[in-house]
Image: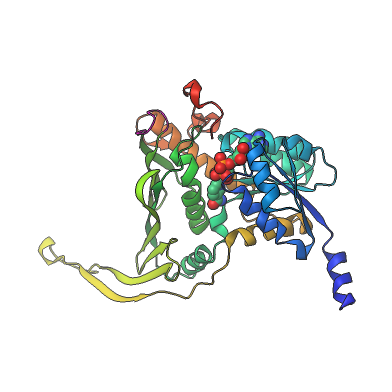
Amino acid sequence: MDTTTETHTTSSNPEMTVGVAGFGYWGPNHVRNMVGLEGIGVAMKTVADPDPVRRMRAATMFPSVGTVESVNAMIEDDEIDAIVISTPVHTHYDLVKDALLADKHVLVEKPMTTSVDKALELTAIAEERGLTLMVGHTFEYTPAVGYIHDFIEQDGLGDVLNIRSQRVNLGQHRAKVNVMWDLAPHDISIILYLLNKMPTHATALGRAHINGYVDDIVSLNLEFEDNFMANIVLSWLDPRKVREMTIIGSDKMLVYDDTHTIEKIRIYDKGVDVPSEYRSFGEFQVSYRNGDIISPQIENFEPLTVQSSHFIECIRTGKTPRSNGASGTRVVQVLAAGQLSLNRGGARTALDDPEVMALDGTVRCRPADTEGQT
Ligand SMILES: NC(=O)c1ccc[n+]([C@@H]2O[C@H](COP(=O)([O-])OP(=O)(O)OC[C@H]3O[C@@H](n4cnc5c(N)ncnc54)[C@H](O)[C@@H]3O)[C@@H](O)[C@H]2O)c1
């Protein structure tokens, strides 16, 4: 046995004990990834979920991990250094705040909160206490988005003129947030990460077909400076699972299809060439460029693994996470502006509208018989 390596690993990577709150659809992925980080000194200790069936499932799937009913037990556990919050969106603020006030580092699922002022408050608490606060904007950790980010930065597309994104499938309906708060955090975080700028205005229209009060189809348009626009379509009412983003550049165009296993990205050497000089409208004739289509080789690894190890690395080194509290807050601000536009029947809404800050995206009008559902 190579004892030198063992000693080195232990001293440079002191044990980090982690708990995961919420063992529904997404929580098990966090637990699996944290268990997988054992080799870098991570001890996945406890799962918290009020649902006994979910706790039973956790115990069966991960026999080495303990289960508790309430997150409070995890927060009060002095051995736990960091908590992953993978619970329904409306619970994030209270759980994150309690965890931070107990000096736990936190990775909270997207969207960070249901309002901008709550996101700002959590970010400030983490900063004051010197804690790592990270938001689970998973797509920022995918090799495909990383590739597109670098390609745009190296001017591979020319000027980026438009992004159109579709994130649609059948379900999963949520009772306390609409489809925009549920699905658009992914598109928004990708777009903000790629462009490194905020929109100035949001315009959103939505419809609630299933229960009449939670929008299940939303079209969200974001305006930026420099004539740039992003259009995002979100739906829980679609026969197909579509995760597609088209990026139109002045030189090339790119299609990112996240459901594709091999050719996730295609770069089209297509465009419109406009004559630099013309004397009359009759002389103005554009020509269309139809060049090669290239599909770059993209590495294939699980983004959640990268995200989980980045969280641990940030705690250990004090480095600021890529998807930190500030970037989580920006995503919530875009969602809140979109929600204000929805509330105003599709009115164009400025991101800095004073009402955006305090707007809470939690759906309030709910029939009593759905209480408790997520
Ligand atoms: N990053 C991604 O790609 C991705 C994918 C899916 C979901 N999510 C996010 O993960 C979070 C959870 O989503 P989900 O689909 O797993 O929801 P879910 O409804 O399937 O599961 C939520 C779980 O949390 C538990 N829970 C509720 N209140 C709790 C509390 N106070 N303390 C502890 N546990 C509690 C529920 O019993 C349930 O087991 C959401 O924020 C969602 O947006 C992220």
311 displayed left or right of 153: right
Whole-percent x and y of residue 371?
Answer: 54, 26
- Image quadrant in which the C terminus is located: top right
374 displayed left or right of 322: left
Whole-percent x and y of residue 169?
Answer: 40, 49
- Image quadrant in which the N terminus is located: bottom right
Residue 308 showing in the rendered view: yes
Indicate the quadrant where residue 220 lies: top left
Magenta region includes residue 212: yes
89 displayed left or right of 316: left
188 displayed left or right of 104: left
Whole-percent x and y of residue 286?
Answer: 19, 67
Magenta region includes residue 311: no
Q: Relative to 309, is 216 above or below?
A: above
Name, please, the residue furthest toward the top.
368
Whole-percent x and y of residue 73?
Answer: 78, 37
Residue at image position (69%, 39%) is 96
